[in-house]
Every structure is written in C-alpha cells, then in structure tokens.
Image: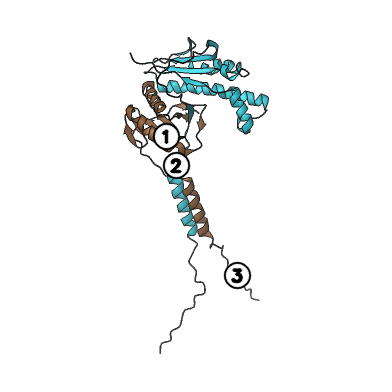
Amino acid sequence: MVQIRKKKNRDAEIPSAGMSDIVFLLLLFFLVSTTIDVDTGIGLTLPEFREDLTDVVPLSKDRLASLNINENGDVLLNGEVIAIPQVKESLIPRIESKIDLPKAKKLVVSIKTARKTNYNLYIQTMDQIKAAYAEVRLAYSQNNFNKKLYELNAEENKELKIKIPIIISIAEPERIK
Amino acid sequence: MTFEKKRSTSKQEIPTSSMPDIIFMLLLFFMVATTLKEVDVFVQYKLPEAEAIEKIENKRLISYIWVGQNGRIQLNDAIVEVEDIRDIMYKKRVELPNVIVSLRIDKGSDMGVVNDIQQALRKADARRINYSAMLKL
C-alpha cells in the first residue's frame, strides 16, 4: 500500500516580498501620468460690459497713467515715448504718492492697444505694471508691518489692498470706422 | 571542539502584511490629487514670459481659451469662432459663477483677437481672467 503522506506546510502565506515592486510601479505610473502644471499668469478682472457709455465720468489727469502701445511696438506713457523696461520705474513714484489719498483719488493705469499690436508687448507692459504695484506693496508692508507680503494676516492684507489698490483699466477698443 | 552556528529560531522577515494598506493609501492620494481632465490642444502656442506672475490656486475653477499661432481659437475642447465664445462662456458662467478664464495666447498674436475675446467675455460676464505666462528666468 502506497503510503500517502500529507505534506505539511507550515508557512501557508502569500509571498508578499514583491509587493513593494507593485507599489513602485503604481507610484511610477501615477507620477508619470499626473500633470501638475500649475497655471501661472497675470490675473485681471475685466470691467463690466455696458452698452452705452454716456454717463462716464472722465478721470482727472493726475489720477491717470495712460499707456498706449501701437502696432510698431512704441509705448507712450502719458503722451511721452518710453521703453517698456522703464514703465515700472516711472509708475512707482506715482503709485507711492497716492497711498494716503482716499479711494477715489488712487492711480488708474490704463492700457490701450491697437489691433495689430503684438500680444507679447502687451504682456510685457502688463508685467511691468504688476511688478510696480508689487514693489510698492512690498515696501509698504516692510515699513508698516515689518513683514513680507506672504506673512501678512488677513487684516493687514485688507489694509494693504485698500491703501494700494491695483486699478488697471483696459481702454475700450475703438470702433472700426 | 565543534562550533555550531547559532541560529535564531524566530523568523527573520520584515512584516509585509500592511503593505497593501500602504498601496491603497498611495493610490488614494494620487487619485484625489490627480485631475484627470486632459484636453487635446489643437492649436500651437508659445506662452509669453513675465516676472510678476501669480498662481491660480483652484484648478477646478479654470476654463481655458487657447489662441494659436495661426489665430485659431480653441475653447475647452473644440475650435470655435469669436462669435461663439459669448454663448459658451455664458453657459459656463451660469454653471460655475466664479469661473476663471485662463487665456493661453501665443505670444506672436495680435491684440485684435485678444480684444475680441475680452469683449466677448465681458458680454458673457465671465470677467475674471488670467493671461497665462511663463516665469521669466
């Protein structure tokens, strides 16, 4: 008689040594397939659309910094030719001089472009304006709160935004006649 | 004299029974963190570069408009005309009141098309926009 002997297997376990490989595979798959591209750019809120522009109040000259960019890439700031990298420097003193003025007297930066103006120039100019405001804001928070911009709490941030609001106006495009 | 190697009787294994839990945690983390909303971009574009740029924190609020080198406009996942933007964006705006429109416009574009898009967005009342730009190094 054949002796049937049951094999005794003490360690009845699923081999889990290769589990770590699986983990790494999963990790790699997700790392490769995930797109973590944070959208960066220049933020802006467009003005409300209105059909009639009859009741518009003209801005006083000293509030307005008007930038004109024509199709050849020439930039005018309040009627004078300026190079784009200089826009920041010339805006900073004007923003700073209006920090303590009431809300209705803050600086308004207006950008106007022609239809054929290059988009890159427009962004460069926008960048200069944003950089000017950022610099003034940073200086203000350093002097008044002795903090960097990202260290400000909600209240201080609010004060900063009231003191130095970023008002950028995109001029109405001219109607084609 | 014979030396006998001392063998410990306990098992020499790292406990791997909790490994599946770790896998599931990783899996869950990536599933939550990944936004699997891939859109095929049909236009070719190169973003402008800028220094004073900011990040948009909430990716789910963003709606994209691309403008390619040849002036073609893509909204979400289809090529559209300027006239269509208003209606599409208005519907989007009703669904998602605080939508941010990210404009990914080729840096060689003319301002004319940008102005047209901006006017359409103003009419659709989707007024929070973002000019997408790369960080200038």
Mark 2 or 1, closer to the camera = 1
Residue indicated by mark 3: B10
Q: Residues within 10 Å of mark 1 (few under 14, many from 20)?
A: many
- Color of chain A here? cyan
Residue indicated by mark 2: A35
Q: Position of residue B106 (x, y in %)?
A: 39, 27
The answer for which chain carries disc 3 is B
- Label 2 to label 1, Cα distance in Å? 25 Å
Mark 3 or 2, closer to the camera = 2
Amino acid tagged 2? Thr
The answer for which chain carries disc 2 is A
Q: Nearer the viewer, residue B45 or A94?
A: A94
Q: Position of residue A72 (x, y in %)?
A: 39, 14
Q: Tell me whether the residue at label 1 lies in contact with that at label 3, contact meaning CB atoms closer than 8 angstroms.
A: no
Q: Which chain is brown?
A: B
Residue indicated by mark 1: B93
User: Can residue A160 be spotted in the picture?
Assistant: yes
- Label 3 to label 2, Cα distance in Å? 46 Å
Which residue of the protein is positioned furthest toward the top in this rendering? A80
Please name the residue shown 58% across and 20% down the image: A103
- Label 1 to label 3, Cα distance in Å? 66 Å
Regarding mark 3 in the picture, which secondary structure is present there?
loop
